Image (cartoon, rainbow, N blue to C red):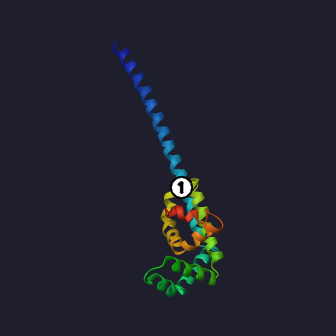
C-alpha cells in the first residue's frame, strides 16, 4: 500500500510539474514575444529619428531656426509690448514666416510629425520612445508656430498639425 500511494503521489506530482512547466514555458514565450515586439517598435521609432536628422526634415528645421534667430528682435518686441496683444504677436510670426519663405519648411515638419503620430497611434512605433525623442521638439514647434497652425486649421484643414498637437497634449 505504501508503494502504491507513493506511485500515486509521484504521478500527481509529475502531472503538476508538467502543468507548471507548460504554464512557465507559455509565460516565457509571451514575455519573449512582447520583448521582440517592443524592440521592433523602438527600431521603427528610431528610423523616424534618423529621418528627423537628415534632409529634407533637418534642412527644414535648420531654415526655421535660422529665420527665427533673424527675427528674434521683432518677436521680442511684440512679446514685450505693453499691454501684450496676442494678435499683434501672431501677425509678427505669420509675416516673418511668409517673408522668410518658410511655409514649405513648416509644412514638411508638420507632415513629418503627422506621420510619426500615425505610427505611434497604430502601435507601429513605440509611444514611450516617440515621446522621449520628439515631444520637446514638437511642443516647441507648436508654440513657435501656433498662429500658423490656427490659420491653417481655419483656412484649409481642421486636422493640420494634429501630430504635433497630440504629442504636446494640446486640444
Quadrant of res 56 = bottom right
Which of the two residues, 100 or 115, is positioned nearer the viewer here?
100
Q: Residue at x 50, y 87 (%)?
A: 73
Residue at x 64% of width, y 71% of height = 108
Quarter of the view holding residue 9: top left
Q: In terms of depth relative to the viewer, which is nearer, 45 or 67?
A: 67
Name the outermost residue toward the front: 83
User: Horizontal and vertical percent for residue 22?
Assistant: 48, 34
135 or 4, which lies in front? Answer: 135
Q: Is residue 65 visible?
A: no
Q: What residue occupies the far top of the structure in this picture?
A: 1
* Whether residue 45 is situated above or below residue 15 in the rendered picture: below
- Say whether residue 49 is visible: yes
Q: Secondary structure at mark 1?
A: helix
Coordinates of residue 66 in the picture (x, y in percent): 56, 83
Residue 91 position within the rendered picture, expressed as x and y whole percent measured from the top left: 56, 80
- Near-viewer residue (136 or 31): 136
Q: Residue 153, position in %: x, y?
A: 61, 66
- Would you call the spot at circle 1 few (<14 residues within 10 Å), some (14-19), or many (20 or more)? some
Residue 100 drawn above or below residue 107: below
Q: For the N terminus, which image quadrant?
A: top left
Side of 162 where 11 appears, left or right: left
Residue at x-position 46% and y-position 35%: 23
Label 1 sits on residue = 39
Residue at 58% in and 76% down: 61
Amino acid at each position: 500500500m505504501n508503494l502504491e500511494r507513493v506511485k500515486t503521489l509521484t504521478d500527481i506530482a509529475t502531472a503538476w510539474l508538467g502543468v507548471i512547466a507548460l504554464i512557465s514555458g507559455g509565460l516565457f514565450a509571451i514575455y519573449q514575444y512582447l520583448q521582440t515586439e517592443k524592440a521592433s517598435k523602438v527600431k521603427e521609432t528610431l528610423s523616424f529619428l534618423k529621418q528627423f536628422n537628415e534632409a529634407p526634415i533637418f534642412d527644414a528645421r535648420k531654415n526655421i531656426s535660422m529665420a527665427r534667430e533673424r527675427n528674434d528682435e521683432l518677436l521680442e518686441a511684440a512679446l514685450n509690448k505693453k499691454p501684450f496683444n496676442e494678435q499683434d504677436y501672431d501677425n509678427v510670426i505669420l509675416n516673418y514666416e511668409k517673408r522668410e519663405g518658410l511655409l514649405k519648411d513648416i509644412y514638411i515638419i508638420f507632415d513629418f510629425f503627422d506621420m510619426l503620430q500615425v505610427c505611434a497611434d497604430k502601435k507601429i512605433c513605440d509611444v514611450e520612445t516617440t515621446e522621449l525623442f520628439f515631444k520637446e521638439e514638437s511642443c516647441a514647434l507648436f508654440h513657435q508656430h501656433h498662429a500658423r497652425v490656427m490659420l491653417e486649421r481655419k483656412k484649409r484643414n481642421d486636422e493640420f498639425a494634429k501630430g504635433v498637437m497630440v504629442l504636446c497634449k494640446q486640444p
